[in-house]
Amino acid sequence: MPESFCPQIFLPKDTRPGAIRNAEDAIRLWIKTAKEDGVEIPQPRGRLVCA
């Protein structure tokens, strides 16, 4: 991830689907902001799968 990635983002949610939605929203916002700021956005390296 680029240096500007914000690892301290905390996305609490009571349900797994809600937590996933929050994470997806945070990712979309980060990408939008990165584009506006001219930050290089890395290509996806696959899908993260958690058990």
Image (cartoon, rainbow, N blue to C red):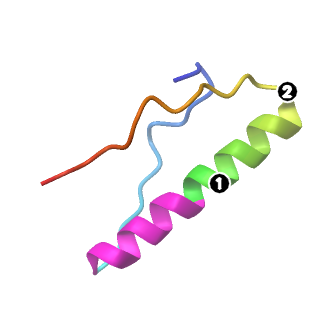
Could you tell me which secondary element the residue under label 1 belongs to? helix
- Which secondary structure dominates the residues rendered in magenta? helix
Task: Give the amino acid at mark 2.
Answer: Gly
Q: Earlier in the sequence, mark 2 or mark 1?
A: 1
Residue 29: give x, y in percent of width and height: 68, 54
Dot 2 lies on which element? loop
- Residue at x 87%, y 39% (from the top left corner): 36
Q: In which quarter of the image is residue 6?
A: top right
Q: In which quarter of the image is the C terminus?
A: bottom left
Compared with 3, 6 (above or below) is: below
Q: Which residue is found at the position 25% from the left and 48% from the top?
A: 49
Which label number is shown at residue 28?
1
Q: Whole-percent x and y of residue 8?
A: 44, 41
Magenta stretch encompasses residue 19: yes
Q: What range of the chain is rendered magenta?
A: 15-25
Residue holding disc 2:
38
Say which of 44 and 15 sits in front: 44
